[in-house]
Every structure is written in C-alpha cells, then in structure tokens.
Image (tube, coloured by chain):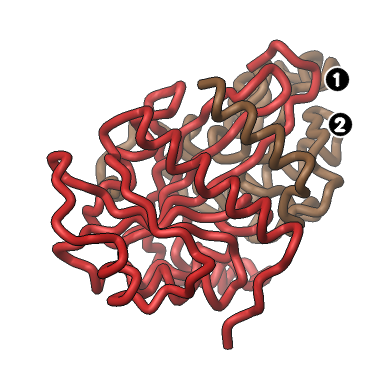
Amino acid sequence: MTDSNQEQPSLRVRPYLVTGGRTRSTIDLPLEALVLTTPAGQAAIESMNHERRRIVELCVERQSLAEISALTHVHLQVAKVLVGDLISEGFLGSHTANASPSVRPDVQLLERVLDGLQSL
Amino acid sequence: MNASANPIPVKIVIAGGFGVGKSTFVGSISDIDPLTTEAAMTKASEAVDDVGDATSKKSTTVAMDFGRVALSSELVLYLFGTPGQDRFHFMWDELIRGAIGAVVLVDTGRLEQCFAAVDYMERAGVPFVVAINAFDGVLRHHPDDVREALDVPAHIPVLVTDARHRAAVRDTLVGLVRHAMMQASSPAPVNS
C-alpha cells in the first residue's frame, strides 16, 4: 500500500483540531457516501474557513467521502465529522446519508451491479 | 459522475496480504487513477470526545487505496484495498460495512499472508471469493490445492485472476457479485 509518510502539500494540522476534538459525526456516513454541495453551500462558500471551504468547493462536483478525504488530504475520520457538520448545516447534501450504512445491497441492486460489470 | 441526479454508490473490498497486487487489481479497472485516503490509527474510532485525550495520542496513519468505476449513470462502484498489515485490521469493520463483499487476493507463493483476511471474512459472514493472482499469467498451484490449504468451505468460490488485466479483474468481480447474490437469497451458515 502507499507509504503514508510522504509529505503532503496541504493541510497539516493536528487532525482533530479542525473538528474541535470530536471524532464522531452525528451523521454516520459510509466511505462511499456521495456528497454534493447545495445551493446554500455555494452561497456560503465565501464565508467559510479553510477546510470547510475546500470541501464545499470540491463537492460542487459529486464526491464520495473517501474522495473528499483523499483529495483534501484530511484524515478520513476528520473528513467524516466535517462533512457531517456541513450536511447538518444544509451546505452539503447526501441522499445516502439517511440509509443504513450497515445493510448490504439486496438482490435487486446486486443484479444491477452485475449488469453494469458485464457491460464494461 | 454527474449524469444521474442520484447515483447509488456500492462498494467491494479487495483484501489480501501485503504486496499481493491489491492496488494493481483496483487500478486495472478504476475509471480514475487510484486515490489514497488516510485514517488515523488512534483509538479515534471509539468515541473520544475529550479534546485532551484525542490530541495527546500519538497519531499513526494507515493508508488505503481506492478506485471508482461507473457501472451506469445510476450506479457507481467503489473498490477499496485493505491495508496490508495485520495491525490495521481495525479499519476492516469500516471498510466492509455495507459492502457487496470482498475479494481475497492470494499469492500462492505466500499463501499464509491471506489467512487473516479469510478468517475475518468468514467470521464476519461477509460474502467473499478467493482469487489467486496468477503473476506473469502463470498459475503455480491448482485452485483445489489452494482451497484445501486455506480450508475454504465448498460454497466459497476459488477463482483465478490476473490483477494486471481489466477483463480478468472484471470477471473476478462478476464472480463475487454472483456469489453475493446466492448468499443473499440463501444465507450461508455462519462459521463459528
């Protein structure tokens, strides 16, 4: 796997400083949850601080939580808290946020995945 | 990615030992260059709400590679490689949550490296297939021998793949999804 010690060009603060020390989000997002900036989020971009702003700017195009973490170089757990906050505040939307993240796909969804894979 | 109003994300986990070809496997089929996300390896996954406690811990990071495949305008598949080392197993619960299932990649030259992944998936009741990565296109051990060596139950598929080739990777994922469909319609007994 990738060497985790390589120097990243961006955000290098203690991970939980930006979340006020919290390591749990009120919204339980899975890694693959897709997130999109809302019109309210776009309108509020100018007033946002560094990390929140970068996330809201990034999610003008739909991104997963994992992509947000990777592209902003923010630890996954931190990204989860920040994104959860931004969803709670109405600046980001995720239609997967309310579904139970622990439930495995049902047979109907698996059939669609199978069709999709076979058409690759 | 933007073609549909609300594409559904699904996830498959690629597990196996260090250096078995997980990143190669993901990269062979991903629409994007695989990305790396980092997670803090503190006790962060336990609710630690006290500021002093959370910030005083030594922060080690664990890196996970992942890729993305658009299966249709309404469906996007994420492939997550597990961190190779055993000490990072704490991340697996998060990775496997809500996943279609897992591909356990096997290098027959270092079979013991996948024991932990097979054990984990069996215990967790996660649909999984074992995929022998035939390096250089050469299969050095028969799948039946690998099944026996790993003590994999008969209902778990043991496949042969080549992590470098998109078609082989796709076929392996198809094998997993078929297996997950069977398990979803008739749940396999949970191994004790």
Contact flag, marks 1 and 2 (Cβ < 8 Å): yes
Q: Amino acid at mark 1?
A: Ala
Give percent across and percent down for residue A62.
67, 22
Give percent across and percent down for residue A53.
64, 26
Q: Nearer the viewer, residue A96 or A18?
A: A96
What subunit carries mark 2?
A
Residue B35 visible somewhere in the drawing: yes
Q: Is residue A76 left or right of residue A73?
A: right
The first of marks 1 and 2 along the sequence is 1
Mark 1 — residue? A40
Q: Is residue A78 left or right of residue B83?
A: right
Mark 2 — residue? A90
Q: Is residue A68 left or right of residue B89?
A: right
Q: Nearer the viewer, residue B132 or A83?
A: B132
Mark-to-mark CA distance, 1 and 2: 7 Å
Q: Nearer the viewer, residue B163 or B56?
A: B163
* Mark carried by residue B41: none
Query: Both on one chain, marks 1 and 2?
Result: yes
Q: Work out which residue is located at the far top of the displayed protein and give it.
A: B3
Give percent across and percent down for residue B71.
60, 25
Q: In what element is the residue under mark 1?
A: helix
| Vertical side of B123 occupied by B182: above or below | above
In the picture, residue B95 is in which quadrant?
bottom right
In the picture, residue B183 is in which quadrant?
bottom right
Q: In what element is the residue under mark 2?
A: loop
The 10 Å Cα crowd at callout 1, few under 14, some 14 to 19, many 20 or more, is few
Q: Chain A colour?
A: brown
Residue at image coords 26%, 47%: B21
Residue A14 visible somewhere in the drawing: no
Q: Amino acid at mark 2?
A: Gly
